[in-house]
Amino acid sequence: MASQAMDSDRGDTLAQADGPDQRQIGAKPAESANAPIPVAILMFPASSASVIFGLYDLLLSVGRDWPLIVGGSPGPQAIRPLLVAAEAGPLTVCNGIPVPVDYPLADCPPVAVVCVPEVNIPPSAPMAGLFDRETDWLAERYRAGATLAASCSGAMLLAEAGLLDGHDATTHWAYCATLRQRFPKVNVHGQRSLVCSGDGQRLIMAGGGTSWLDLALFLIARLVSVEAAMQVAKLNLIDWHQIGQQPYARLAQTRQVEDALIARCQVWIAEHYRSPAPVAAMAKLSGLSERSLNRRFKAATGLSPLEYVHTLRLEEAKQLLEAGDLPVETIARDVGYEDAGFFNRLFQRQVKLTPAQYRKRFRGLRLSLDGPARGESRNASGSDF
């Protein structure tokens, strides 16, 4: 059975996600194009609050938080997460935390995706009969066209629902043997971190304790866009948090309005940051001396005009490094630096990574999410599966 997957030892890479053209991946109700996409998070007593709320917060942030950080105002919400359970809530989950329930299963409206968190019971413990209402509902939603996305040991519920027979699957390493033993018709790939299989690739499984992070990015890329997934990854330091926050930092381009003259300069420099003498040009535009411009600009934005220009140029360089294969020297010239050596030193000082290191980390994420949108199917090293 064909599947899309990635080896679990390549932690810096996700399995390929469909591009924006594949937005309709489940039984999305008849809504306007701008309405948030409904995604259900299935809860049960053996699930944990951290995964439930983590998924909820990441999905809720899509489209909303990135514009808030970089522009000062929240954007339109792209996904509407719903907390669902067998009965009306609140539901007390495995770590003793009561969680509100938006809908009991019987009343849940149509959704595009159902997320299944981990099952916190020992791998050897019997599960037959423990989740009958949940597995019946999952099977019903799958037949209706929804995508089912299971994190960690949540794949066991998909198997209990009879949905994995004859299909590729993955789960937490501690449950792989149990999954094979109890469901011999399932093709278990314990070495893979993420697998898509089933009708229309609508069964998605991510293995590992924190795999819900990868799962969330994958779903965001498929439901909304690769760019939205990249934004969520950067805002939340997903996958590469050990290197610090600098690679994810972008200029918070809040349009300050207190100083209209400086705001005019900001608008101009956003289009002309490649200019060979941008600070002098802003001084001429403002009618101020460079010294006066420096003082007023820093008071309004917290950055000197030159620091502001460097930041804009570096942000454009980041996008070019993520999105293409242009040589670093070419990117340096494209954003306004004739001296590639100076650009490299400045980039490393500000971002805490060299341009090559930044490309290796972030280009990989973009490609892994965006690949099939361009008809590609590659692993992290660039070779075909």
Image: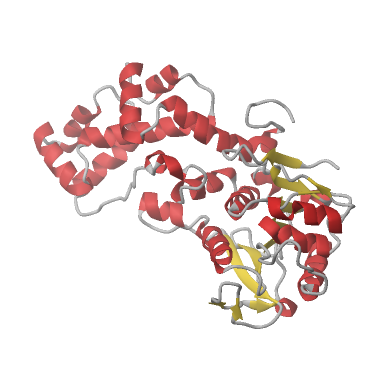
Relative to 59, is 367 above or below?
above
**In the image, residue 131 lies at what x, y percent?**
77, 72
Q: Residue at x 50, y 50 (%)?
A: 232
Task: Please say which color scheme the image uses.
Answer: secondary structure
Residue most extreme to the front? 124
Q: Is residue 236 above or below residue 334?
A: below
Asked if residue 265 can be seen in this view, the reply is yes
Instruction: Please provide percent x and percent y for residue 54.
Output: 54, 61
Quarter where residue 227 is shown: top right
Q: Residue 369, percent across and down?
A: 62, 41
> Hey, which quadrant is residue 105 in on the image?
bottom right
Q: Residue at x 40, y 55 (%)?
A: 68
Res 278 quadrant in image = top left
* Quarter occupied by the C terminus: top right
Query: Which residue is located at x 69 percent, y 31 percent?
Result: 378
Residue 83 to residue 205: above or below? below
The image quadrant where one finds the N terminus is top right
Q: Position of residue 38 (x, y in %)?
A: 64, 64
* Front residue of 333 and 365: 365
Q: Nearer the viewer, residue 185 or 204?
A: 185
Query: Does any portion of residue 206 appear in the rendered image?
Result: no
Q: Is residue 63 left or right of residue 264?
A: right
Horizontal relation, residue 359 to residue 17: left or right: left
